[in-house]
Image (cartoon, grey):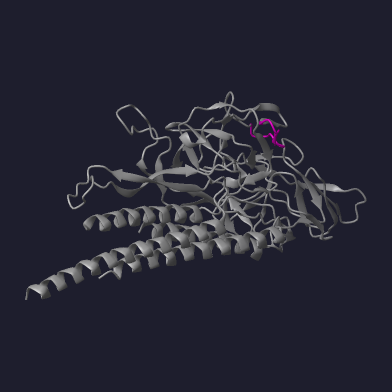
Amino acid sequence: MKALYIASTGMGAQERNVEVISNNIANMRTTGYKRQRAEFQDLLYQQITRAGSQTSDQGTLVPAGLEIGSGVRTVSTPRVMSQGSVNLTEGELDVAIRGEGFFMIQLPGGRTGYTRDGSFERDAEGTLVTSSGYPVDPGITIPGNARGVSIAPDGTVEAFIGTDTTATQIGQLQLARFVNKSGLESMGDNLFLETAASGPAQVSVPNTDGAGDLLQNYLEMANVNSVTEIADLIAAQRAYEMNARVISGADQMMQATSQLS
Amino acid sequence: MENAQLIGLSRQIALQRQLDVVANNIANLNTTGFKAEQILFEEYVMPVARDNDFPSLDQPLSYVQDWATMHDMTGGAIVQTGNELDVALNGDGFFAVQTAGGERWTRAGSFQLNNQGTLVDQSGNPVLGTGGPIQFGPDEVGITIASDGTVSSSAGAKGQLRIVEFANAQDLKREGLNLYSGGQPQANTTTRAMQGHVERSNVSGVTEMAEMIRVQRAYESAASLAQKQDDMRRNAIQRLGDANA
C-alpha cells in the first residue's frame, strides 16, 4: 500500500510546518527576528503509462499518462527578510536599520556574525557590545566621560567628551549586505552567519550602495504577523489530520484484504 | 468462475492506485502551486475470454483499468505574502525554469536569489526571462515585477519573466519538485503575474476526504465480493462431495 507511505510524508511535512510556525510565534517579541516559512515540493512520480505511448497499431496515442506521485517533502525554510516595524524605545544605544543591511558582530574565534538586533550596550571598557556582550564591528569605544551619544542615519557616532560644547566623532557604524539574505545561516542569539548560498558580505556605510539608514532610539521588532501565523497553524493542523485519516483509510483497506479467508 | 475473482481483483488494484493518488493530493495540501490529480478508469473488455458453458456466443468480460491521471488545472487560492520575490500566476500560464535536463514549467512562484544574484526557484533552478535568466547586481534594491512579468529594480529594467501557456495542459508530465515537462509552450496571452503573492495548492481537503471514503468502501465491497465467491465455491465443493458419498 503506497498510500501509507505517501500519507506519512504528508504528516512529516505538516509536522515540520507546525515546528516552523511555533518558532515564529515563540519569537514574536524578539528584536530583529525574521520569520521563516516552510516551502514544500511534490516528490517524484511513478510513470505507469507514459503520456503519448501508442495504444493501437493505427498510431493512436494515450492523451494523458498515468502518474502516481510519492508524496511531499520540505525543501527549505527560507527567512522572510521584510522590514519589521520600528518601535521607539528611547534607549540611547538602541539602533534600528531602516532598509537592507545587517550590523556586524565580532564573535569569539574570529568569526563575524550578522544581526538586525540593534539593542546595544556599553561594557566595562566602554566598548559598544550586543546584549550578549559581543563587540560590534568596527569597534567603537565610548569614553567614560562621554555624554549625549548620538548615532546619525549614516552611522556616524558622536559624543560630547567631558565639558566640550562641540561633539566629537568617536566611530562609524557599518552595515553588511548580502546578495541572497535568505541564504544566511541562523546561529541563534539573533545572529546570522555567512554561507556559500548567501554570497560574501558587502560592507558599506549606511545610506549608500543600497544599505539602509540607521535610526537611533528605535528598535526593529520581529516581522511576525500573529494573525497569519495562527491561520497557517490551523491550516497545518487540519492538513495533518487529513493525512492521518488517509493512513487509517489505507489501513482499513488492508484489513479488508487480510480478513479474506 | 475464477473470472469473477479476477475482475474483482482488477477493481481492487485500480482502487489501491486511486487511494495512492488521493494520498498524494492530501500530502501536497500545502505545496505551493501544486495541482491536484484525478485518476480515470475505463472498462477493459476482454474479447479473448472463452467459455463454452454459455449457449450463445462467448461473453465479453469487463475488467477495470486505470487509464490515465488527469491534472486538475484550476487555480489555487492566491495568498498575499508581501515577499517581493513571491509571484503568483493569475491564469493558466506557467513559469519557465532552466534545469540540467532542459526547460521545465512550474506554477510555484516562491522564488529566491542565489549567491550570484540570479532569480531561482526553491530548488535553485534559474527562472527564465524572455532573454534568459534574470540577474540582479549586488547593490540593487526594490525589485518589482509588473503584471506582464516585466522585472525591474533600482538599476532599471531587468527583463521579462517568460510565462508560457499550453493549449492542452494534460500533455504535461509531472516531474516532482513542483516541475512539469513536455507540452507545446505557446506565448502567454492572458496570464497575469502578481508580485507579493503565492498560489497555494488547489487540493480541496473535503473533496479528497469524501473521495477517500468512497474508495475505501468500494474496496471493501470488492473484497467482500471475493469472499462471497470463495464461499460459493467452497459450498459447491462440499455439497458435491456429500452427494457422492
Q: In this view, does A246 lie to the left or right of A54?
A: right
Residue B190 appearing in the image: yes
Residue A189 appearing in the image: no
Work out which quarter of the rendered image holds the N terminus of chain A and state it. Answer: bottom left
Between B234 and A143, the one lying in front of the other is: B234
Going by the picture, which residue comes out furthest to the front?
A: B55
Percent from the top left, x then y, of residue B213?
47, 63
Work out which quarter of the rendered image holds the C terminus of chain A and state it. Answer: bottom left
Between B46 and A25, the one lying in front of the other is: B46
Position of A133 relative to B85 (above/below): below
Instruction: Identify the residue at horizontal 55%, vertical 42% (top origin).
Output: B73
Between B176 and A174, the one lying in front of the other is: B176
Magenta highlight range: B137-149
Instruction: Identify the residue at horizontal 48%, vertical 47% (top origin).
Output: B37
- Taken as a whole, is the magenta stretch helix, strand or loop? loop
The quadrant in which residue A132 appears is: bottom right
Percent from the top left, x then y, of residue A42?
47, 48
Going by the picture, which residue comes out furthest to the top?
A: B131
Position of B207 relative to A244 (above/below): above
Residue A82 falls inside the magenta stretch: no
Going by the picture, which residue comes out furthest to the right?
A: A165
Percent from the top left, x then y, of residue A204?
70, 39
